[in-house]
Image: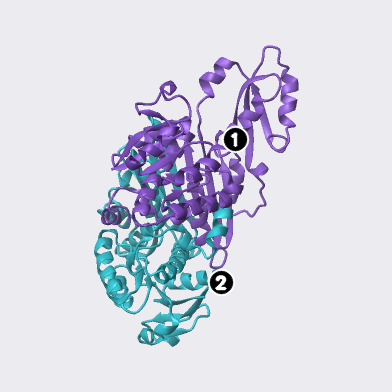
Chain colours: A cyan, B purple
Amino acid sequence: MIRVAIVGYGNLGRGVELALKQNPDMSLVGVFTRRAPDTVTTQGAQAYAMEDLVGKKAEIDVCILCGGSATDLPEQTPALTKDFNTVDSFDTHAKIPEHFERVNQVGKANQTLAVISTGWDPGLFSLNRLYAQSILPEGETYTFWGEGVSQGHSDALRRIPGVADATQYTIPNEEVIEALKAGQKMNVTTRDKHFRQCFVVLEENGDAAAVKEAIVTMPNYFAEYDTEVNFISQRELDKEHKAMPHGGKVLRTGTTGTDTQQVIEYNLALASNPEFTASVLVAYARACVRLAQEGHTGAMTVLDIAPKYLSPIADDILRRDLL
Amino acid sequence: MIRVAIVGYGNLGRGVELALKQNPDMSLVGVFTRRAPDTVTTQGAQAYAMEDLVGKKAEIDVCILCGGSATDLPEQTPALTKDFNTVDSFDTHAKIPEHFERVNQVGKANQTLAVISTGWDPGLFSLNRLYAQSILPEGETYTFWGEGVSQGHSDALRRIPGVADATQYTIPNEEVIEALKAGQKMNVTTRDKHFRQCFVVLEENGDAAAVKEAIVTMPNYFAEYDTEVNFISQRELDKEHKAMPHGGKVLRTGTTGTDTQQVIEYNLALASNPEFTASVLVAYARACVRLAQEGHTGAMTVLDIAPKYLSPIADDILRRDLL
């Protein structure tokens, strides 16, 4: 049995608790939170104060870190890797090299292993980009996001004066995708690749025209995109637009031989982004413990880990059933 | 520079020669063939007799074995792994465990490394089945083949009396795919998942009705499928149906949490099956040499190999650019 601690209990931590129930080779020691443990409602797990974590070191094989990338993980991953094997979903792309170096040093110094930046992007999308460009060295890789909810863009909508609540969907441009898959050579920007669809609830005296103008002219978030704005009631938003679907696509179009067209495509369609990310974290937590048992220390990413380590099934059975 | 020998020079060997030109960290020592070398027309490579291979051992880091799975590879891979690191695309699914064991023993005994059963199925499809089932343990995996040419079914058509030549396309059932992706639970057989489309050239006095009857009633190959038979001229067959496109899809539909639908999908659309398979072999040849340099011996499959080994790019650059 692989004994797991969940550190942080928001949507992602809750997803990890649910995912662990689908993996009979793993058991949950408890949820560790900065809140008062008796105020945390779990799906059955025991909640503990964060301060109690190190005291339970002997009972824990791996900590799954479910905090945010902005402020939690840059501190927590190095700090906890002193005492534990850890897995995180650190997703601030530009800061991953720095995060890797810090965590790697701590792991090497303390004989622990950290698997950083798992999830789907970074994570599964990263390894698909790597496989695809290695197999088709002459070609282009395109990443599309959506259809799904962007939390950052939804937050930006909610900060506009006159907006009570809002949800923003990022929608990939299917025409661009089809043209690329058909072998068309195009220079496509993130703008060309995506639309933005907004569902907005106005405050009681909110001015729809002014809010719409503020949205479609907002630099970086909306001004550069084709943006659709829909005003709806809070009731409708709560009913139809509070789930957290997401997904996307990694597309590699390349040529072999004499301009022979080859296409590799990886798609995710996720009804719940946090539950799926949690499932990826759990599979890499298994890999982390197994690699640590083999003597690996420091930091690793999904690029460093052979597929077999994610599975609880013996190598010879995998060869028989999956090859 | 990774120094490569190509063993066997049919469509796959030709594809490897072309793929190596796209990989500047690899160089081709030569093509080794059982035919008289001066009768073999390469894309520029030197051709040698098979008997000269072992004499060039000091110049070769890895042999890419391009023979067939029926009779060549079961003999060649163990034999050549005595002297060389090797990569093959052995694809007789049921015999992979046995092939693995034999080659593994030879590699361990001779301090060489063999990477077996690369390509796309087995190969890239295998590792996608593994990733997907490990991340979504509650779910179903479906593999679809096509749209593409099945050599085995085309051969079966050509053996029918009255048939001069033929090409068979395997076509996946898009309705089944869409239903599965939409979350429908179905028991689908290989038959439900695919159609068969035949383009047949009759011999001069061939009887179309008899040939058609022989096709649609042929057990295992066609009788169990919806099969379309088209009679065309040799000229049209040569013009439109002599390419070797193929591809397919690995689809995992699973649930997380409380019946939350999650879909992982991997697609290949290949204008040339042998050129793409060759590109996969070349990327795994790089991995083979690097893993051998790290001291690995015996046999490995795509399930055992971390993604980073396929790439010529340094680990820190991969982390910066792909995560």
Quadrant that contains the C terminus of chain B = bottom left
Is B252 positioned to the left or the right of B323 in the image?
A: right
Q: What chain does mark 1 sit on?
A: B
Place residue A186 in its image quadrant: top left
Tell which of A141 and B29 is nearer to you: B29
Residue B253 coordinates in the image, percent (x, y): 56, 55
Name the residue: 62% across, 29% down.
B155
Residue A287 coordinates in the image, percent (x, y): 44, 66
Name the residue: 51% across, 19% down.
B239
Q: What chain does mark 2 sit on?
A: A
Location of residue A39 with respect to A4 vertically, above or below: below
Tell which of A91 and B184 is nearer to you: A91
Give a yes or no on whether discs 2 and 1 share a subunit: no
Location of residue A119 with respect to A39 vertically, above or below: above
Residue B89 coordinates in the image, percent (x, y): 49, 42
Location of residue B119 with respect to B299 vertically, above or below: above
Place residue A115 in its image quadrant: bottom left
Q: Which residue is mark 2?
A: A24
On residue A217, the disc is none
Is B51 positioned to the left or the right of B158 in the image?
A: left
Q: Answer yes or no: is residue A241 visible.
A: no
* Secondary structure beneath label 1: strand
Tell which of B145 and A188 is nearer to you: B145
Crowdedness near tag 1: few (<14), some (14–19) or many (≥20) residues, C-alpha within 10 Å:
many
Crowdedness near tag 2: few (<14), some (14–19) or many (≥20) residues, C-alpha within 10 Å:
few
Q: Amino acid at mark 2?
A: Pro
Q: Amino acid at mark 1?
A: Thr
On residue B170, the disc is 1
Residue A226 coordinates in the image, percent (x, y): 34, 46
